[in-house]
Image (spheres, grey):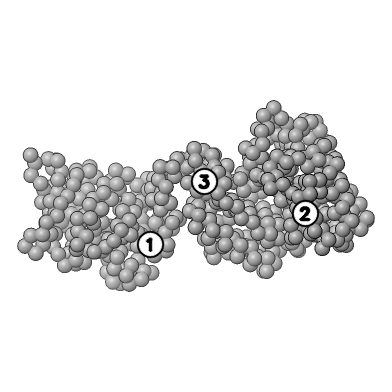
């Protein structure tokens, strides 16, 4: 099973794609774009149209990348910039309507919990009292742990974009701006400092782009170049103080020449460095350990923790399409024995009559899925359940299918019983001419297969076909069991077959030995 997790942060949008195996995962790919959703948003209270469009384009690119890598599901969460924007809901709605991407806007508390879950899987917290800090664009999250358990957590509106826009009007910042910054941040953080000191943290861990960037810059200042991997790398308080002084004395265009700093962070890194220094001082930490895992990895771990059944299913059923169909059949409590029997018989009939219908492997797959789902409408009501099946299939978020394939499956399930489809049937309206013809042909096959399990007892074991006197004879093997009702029902439901293929059907039971 492959999963993608998208973190729509206030400064950057990140995505990781991972393969899940045995309840754990390995990262396959990472992608990042510094969109800057929070820039101007946290003060104006609205996402600008330009920023919103850039964000949607980035999400579209990431979604296509995840799909090409075979990821399913694609999980997306948004944090403070979208959460606080008056038009954040509009952004979420556009992502759904334009991209088919569902975004979960999470609270600061949820964000903190997911960040801690990632950190404790990446760094050994056994025997420790870890304090995890994540500095984002709109907020910071502080989580105090006892081993692998959270003691308390807090989300504060002290992100680097928010603080930069509020305090720093000059480049480099003036002394008065820096003093105002420090006084404000210390006042907001003092209750956190007092609370943490009572538990006396034994380890400080820093996640997020800001803290990782500062760690890389400090390492480059000491070693000449930033390390390739920052995980578990230590940012010392003394080194941070030297780096902060250098940052505050330089203009943004000069900072970009400091090794380890990305160009688009140049105007925010001053606030990040000051904030990190205040956090280390206030929590009385001499060093902060870098953790490359954060919110997006926490999303993956949370999904695995809450979807053991789906993960196990993915290990046994690697096809996204088949897994999605089986999940829907299970979710809507379709009678599994009957659905599987009808699917088996439909495929037997399909294979035995290839020379007549001349359909290929793609059509065969759609027929099987329609057979497995043809009775899901019983979840709603027995009366008219074929119509309910059509609705559930079209609206049930089956994954891996294009819209035309999905509609074919729904139409075939819709017409497994009742009156055969007509040219004027509204269910056919959205299909191309070729797919309309395909849906009708597959409906003809499914109707016969459904008739051959009329009693839902799985009586028919195999079937063979032979042409005789201008019609097609279906020889049914029921291993000596009474198949009279099955033969009667299949004959009654063969009208559409004869209309589609111009060949009458005749059903006969194989003589028992």
Question: Nearer the viewer's eye, disc 1 or disc 2?
Answer: 2
Task: Measuring from the top left, give residue 97's x and y in whole percent.
Answer: 53, 64
Q: Which mark is residue 259?
A: 2
Q: Which residue is drawn at the image coordinates 6% and 62% (left, top)?
A: 469
Task: Mark 1 or mark 3: name the one nearer the start of the chain.
Answer: 3
Q: Which mark is residue 19?
A: 3
Task: Measuring from the top left, give residue 261's x and y in whole percent.
Answer: 76, 55
Marks 2 and 3, how far apart in space? Answer: 33 Å
* Quarter the C terminus occupies: top left
Up/down of 122 relative to 61, above or below: above
Task: Measuring from the top left, give residue 172's x and y in whole percent.
Answer: 88, 59
Question: Nearer the viewer's eye, disc 2 or disc 3?
Answer: 2
Q: Which residue is drawn at the image coordinates 47% and 46% (left, top)?
A: 1
Q: Nearer the viewer, residue 393 or 504?
A: 504
How crowded is the residue under tag 3: few (<14 C-alpha within 10 Å), some, or many (20+)? some
How crowded is the residue under tag 2: few (<14 C-alpha within 10 Å), some, or many (20+)? some
Q: Which mark is residue 405?
A: 1
């Amino acid at each position: 099973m492959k999963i993608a997790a998208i973190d729509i942060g206030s400064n950057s949008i990140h995505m990781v794609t991972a393969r899940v195996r045995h309840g754990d995962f390995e990262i396959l790919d990472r992608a990042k774009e510094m969109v800057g959703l929070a820039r101007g948003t946290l003060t104006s209270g609205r996402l600008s149209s330009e920023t919103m469009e850039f964000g949607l384009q980035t999400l579209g690119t990431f979604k296509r990348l995840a799909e090409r890598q075979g990821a399913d599901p694609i999980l997306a969460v948004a944090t403070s910039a979208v959460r606080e924007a008056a038009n954040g809901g509009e952004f979420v709605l556009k992502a759904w309507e334009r991209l088919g991407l569902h975004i979960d806007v999470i609270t600061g508390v949820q964000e903190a919990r997911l960040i801690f879950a990632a950190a404790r899987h990446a760094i050994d917290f056994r025997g420790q009292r870890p304090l995890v800090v994540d500095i984002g664009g709109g907020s910071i999250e502080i989580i105090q742990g006892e081993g692998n358990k959270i003691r308390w957590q807090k989300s504060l509106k002290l992100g680097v974009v928010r603080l930069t826009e509020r305090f720093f009007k000059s480049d480099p910042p003036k002394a008065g701006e820096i003093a105002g910054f420090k006084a404000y941040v210390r006042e907001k953080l003092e209750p956190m400092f007092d609370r943490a000191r009572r538990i006396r943290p034994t380890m400080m861990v820093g996640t997020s782009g800001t803290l990782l960037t500062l760690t890389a810059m400090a390492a480059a200042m000491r070693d000449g170049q930033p390390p390739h991997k920052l995980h578990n790398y230590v940012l010392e308080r003394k080194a941070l103080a030297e780096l902060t002084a250098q940052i505050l004395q330089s203009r943004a265009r000069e900072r970009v020449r400091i090794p380890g700093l990305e160009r688009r962070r140049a105007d925010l890194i001053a606030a990040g460095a000051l904030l990190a220094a205040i956090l280390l001082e206030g929590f009385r930490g001499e060093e902060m350990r870098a953790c490359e895992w954060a919110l997006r990895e926490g999303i993956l771990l949370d999904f695995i923790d809450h979807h053991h059944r789906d993960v196990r299913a993915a290990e046994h059923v690697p096809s996204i399409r088949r897994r999605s169909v089986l999940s829907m059949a299970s979710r809507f409590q379709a009678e599994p024995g009957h659905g599987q029997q009808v699917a088996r018989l439909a495929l037997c009939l399909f294979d035995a009559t290839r020379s007549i219908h001349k359909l290929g492997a793609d059509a065969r797959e759609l027929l099987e899925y329609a057979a497995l789902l043809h009775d899901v409408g019983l979840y709603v009501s027995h009366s008219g359940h074929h119509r309910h099946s059509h609705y559930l299939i079209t609206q049930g978020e089956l994954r891996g299918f294009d819209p035309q394939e999905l509609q074919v499956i729904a139409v075939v399930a819709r017409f497994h019983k009742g009156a055969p489809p007509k040219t004027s049937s509204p269910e056919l309206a959205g299909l191309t001419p070729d797919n309309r013809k395909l849906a009708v042909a597959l409906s003809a096959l499914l109707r016969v297969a459904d008739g051959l399990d009329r009693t839902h007892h799985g009586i028919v074991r195999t079937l063979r076909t032979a042409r005789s006197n201008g019609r097609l004879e279906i020889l049914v093997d029921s291993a000596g069991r009474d198949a009279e009702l099955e033969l009667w029902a299949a004959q009654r439901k063969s009208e559409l077959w004869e209309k589609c293929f111009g060949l009458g059907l005749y059903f006969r039971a194989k003589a028992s030995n």
